[in-house]
Image (cartoon, coloured by chain):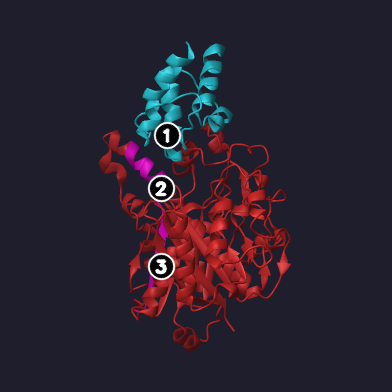
Amino acid sequence: MTGLGVAAPNGVGIPAFTEAIKAGISGIRHDPELAALQFSCQIAGRPDVPEILQLQYLDALELRNFNSNGILYGLIAGIDAWKDAQLPVGAELAPDWDSGTIFGAGSAGVDKLREAIYKVDALQVRRLGSTVVPQTMASGISAWLGGKLALANQVSTNSSACATGAESVLMAYERIRNGHAKRMLAGSTSDAGPYIWGGFDALKVCTFKHNDHPAAGSRPMSASASGFVPGSGAGALVLESLDSALERKAPIYAEVLGGHINAGAQRGDGSMTAPNSIAVQRCIREAIKAAGVEPEEIDAINGHLTATGKDALEVENWSTALGRRGKDFPYINALKCMIGHCLSASGSIELVAAILQLNEGFLFPNINCEDLHPDITAIIDPEKIPQQLVYKELNLIAKASFGFGDVNACVILKKYK
Amino acid sequence: MDKETLITQLREIVKPYAKNEEALLNINENTDFVNDLKINSANLVDVILDVEEQFNIVIDNESMERMLNVKSAIEIIEAKLGAQ
């Protein structure tokens, strides 16, 4: 890992994001648009991206008729990560055959698509112009990044619901390990807005109890957790072979030791919307095996932990998979307490946070869980759930993400020494 | 509307979602939607939408959260019908 970029509800750009997660700053705000549309949940997380910032990533012509916030967030995170890795950006670059991207998305340009649907239904298809396809195709984000960064290896978009971000990192890792690319930009993005979040609001998986106090609304691991808070944004990570990184003398944030991707087949306690615990445990164990480490070596867990009723089950699954509980359990934290559930972007933004923790040696605080859920404290010691910023040397972090469709991904990260 | 009629109507509403036919046949006040009828928890919102349509009522979020079994469903439907 040689480059990081992020557009998160509580910070756009690595310096702002790092500061925010250390300070436990929530990016969740009251959302007037959701309130006007009479959503049950009227709070949400959106990255702050004023036009002046947008112009650093898209020129005035590109921004004309641009209405795909997911692509915008992905471009900010992706281009930042590439620059952070000291790799070149610009229209004058020759194709870089050794560099590609797997940049995931849950959907693309829903707002743009809505615009197009209205025009088509009004018999104005010819007035769609040239901008609809690149902003609404599923692979839009990887296509835009490919052009900006002259990526000439594989340029593709993966999609596996809330596991998308973690999956993109493992797909990029495998491509490099198989010798098909030297460098891959991994990451994922998620659109913001009512047309993305409406379906979750209808499923009643979002909280409706914190409309008056947004910052306290996202409560992973808390006894008063009552559903997730919808979020959005993008995270990006540059992966490259160690040879390539050393040759370029690029600063190295962390190493991907390995990981595992699987699915629970919607059997057992798994369904379209719930994880099969056997599959989750297997995914974690196989990831640790692939990384060539032992469960007792894991220093910290960056959980999926969404603040629905499933958090205790996730902790139980980690505990069973690792064979560790009580005081012997690793530290665990959940970034969703500050940024909500960024859906397809959640895994990549949370991985960026996990890598910053390894690189700088800290555990960001879990906010909004003063009232830890008793089912969780029955499994692990409360001191393993830091509620204040802790500076601590960490060597191995396990990060997992789980998604609708009963899909799982787990990545094992190591501090680079 | 008496309880028996309500339960009969509820049985028809949950029929497409219920995975346990025996429990559906024996549906009573103590039947739990998820544990007994084996309705996928994600489908509970669809059951509630169908109840709203059938009885021409609107079920608020707090009631929705409680509507996990026949007993609470009857209470909520009766309360909403009574309030009309």
Chain A in the picture: what colour? red
- State which quadrant residue A383 falls in: bottom right
Query: In front here: A83 or A364?
Result: A364
Circle number at residue A417: none
Say which label, 2 or 3, has the lower sequence index: 3
Disc 1 is attached to a residue of which chain? B
Mark carried by residue A271: 2
x, y percent for residue A77: 50, 63
Kind of residue indicated by mark 2: Ser
Tell me the residue that label 1 is attached to.
B37
- Compared with residue A266, is residue B45 higher up or lower down, i.e. above or below? above
Discs 1/2, front: 1
Q: Amino acid at mark 1?
A: Leu
Chain B: drawing colour: cyan
Circle 3 sits in a helix, a strand or a loop, which is it? helix
Q: Give me the C-alpha separation between circle 2 and circle 3.
A: 39 Å
**Proximity of marks 1 and 3: CB atoms separated by less than 8 Å:** no
Q: Residue at x 39, y 69 (%)?
A: A171
Are labels 1 and 3 assigned to the same chain?
no
